[in-house]
Amino acid sequence: MHYLKIHNRSNHPQTFQCHGYNGNKDLTINANGQASLEAPDGTSGAIIAVHEGQIGEQCEITKHGYMGNDTIDISNICGAGGNMTCQQVGDPAGKFKGHETFMQACNQAYHKLSQDKKNQLKGHVFLDSKGNVKRIAAPKDFQPLEQFVRTFANGRTYIGVGAWGPSGGNPADNAQSKAGNGSKDILIIYSDGNAAPDPSKPFTGQSIEAAEFSAASIIGGGVKMAATTQSLGPGIQLTNKSPRKNTYFFYDNYWNGNGEAGANFDHPLKHVEVGPNQTVHVPLPTSFKGRVQRGDQQPATWGEFQVKASNDGGAHGDISLQQGCDGAATVASTDGSNVSNGFDKDILKGAPAAALDKKPNGEKTLASTEGNWKGPGNQAAVDWEYKQLGHGKAYIKGGTGVPDVASKNNCLHFTFYVP
């Protein structure tokens, strides 16, 4: 078992949101205190510092991800109010990620700005009673703030959103997503002063190796794409949010009509194996109209999509539970429009027995709501899914009412959450 070793080097208690770790419960570490959280291989998430009720700097983690390597970075895309660094335990003291004196550098840079620039940042840079910077809002939401932060922290932390769809992203951000060396304990340092692992040792480079990776993590309730170096072609980005590898099958519809389609249950076009918490690009012809699902058995959650629509030339997709549910799923654009739908809640958990079914391999699922060769739709499943999700996140019953997600670059991003 590996661990996240979190050190609070400040002289006050510091609260952290824990996504994917500590049972997703907030963690408060006393002044100059430490905490150790279990971080099994295959897990991913973030440790996020909270300031005045707002999220700020965060350490993003994927344990034993692509090619068995950890991937860690420090991100300030959601804001900042303190200093944070991270490294794999055992790395040299000067080899880490993050800006060890981010807030001090921010304050110095702010005081050098013209009054016009300061006025432009009003409402995004927050000052204490002495006029010094105590917190900043999210650079990802306000381009002038992002540009300001790059003047003192470029290349040391995530500031923008990295590569996204047709955009190559900022190379300095993309570099934050390079993988580490193997799977180890992770040291996370928070400080109001110097947050370097050893403040007496200067920064010598990032805690990374040369391997690029591609993954997704849940940050602040949304999906943040980590950097990828490749240009996305027609097809989908596919993330397997699971501690184990899974195989995903692609089915092209037999026929397509006006709001209707002939579902294909027995002749998949292709299949891909995706490792634990891994993201891959799956190229597809622009003529593809159908679905992706985990495995080749029903009932299953369907990611329905077409790569190139005849009306606007873009990709369109949604999540459907009409033929069952074997886990949560989301769909998101990759063209920079930041549109998404679906759900990441485990709705199999606590479901009434009357709503359940099984695949031929014995895996527990929620039953089909529309019915198929096995019989009519299961009303208990309909009722349970509407209770858990409402009407706008996934198709449960009927063919309207769920907003689809569009991506002009003919590439959607589907994420499947395996319970």
Image: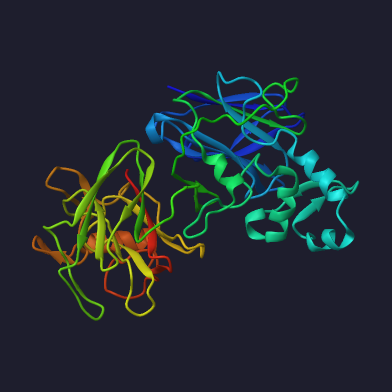
Query: On the picture, is 181 further left or further right than 354?
Result: right
Q: Which residue is rendered at x = 57% and y = 29% of the image?
A: 207
Q: Position of residue 298 (x, y in %)?
A: 17, 54
| Identity of the residue drawn at 39% across and 77% down | 312
Q: Position of residue 239 (x, y in %)?
A: 37, 48
Query: Can you see residue 270?
Result: yes
Residue 353 in sight from this viewpoint: no
Image coordinates for residue 288, horizontal then vertical, percent: 25, 66
Vertical relation: 339 (above or below) 205: below
Between residues 8 and 384, which one lies in front from this camera angle? 8
The image quadrant that residue 142 belongs to is bottom right
- Where residue 236 sits, quadrant-wise, is bottom left
Quadrant in which residue 31 is drawn:
top right
From the viewer's perspective, is 382 left or right of 96? Answer: left
Q: Quadrant of the C terminus?
A: top left
Residue at horizontal 61%, vertical 52%?
A: 160
Front residue of 189 and 145: 145
Q: Quadrant of the N terminus?
A: top left
Q: Position of residue 230 (x, y in %)?
A: 43, 50
Q: How is the image coloured?
A: rainbow
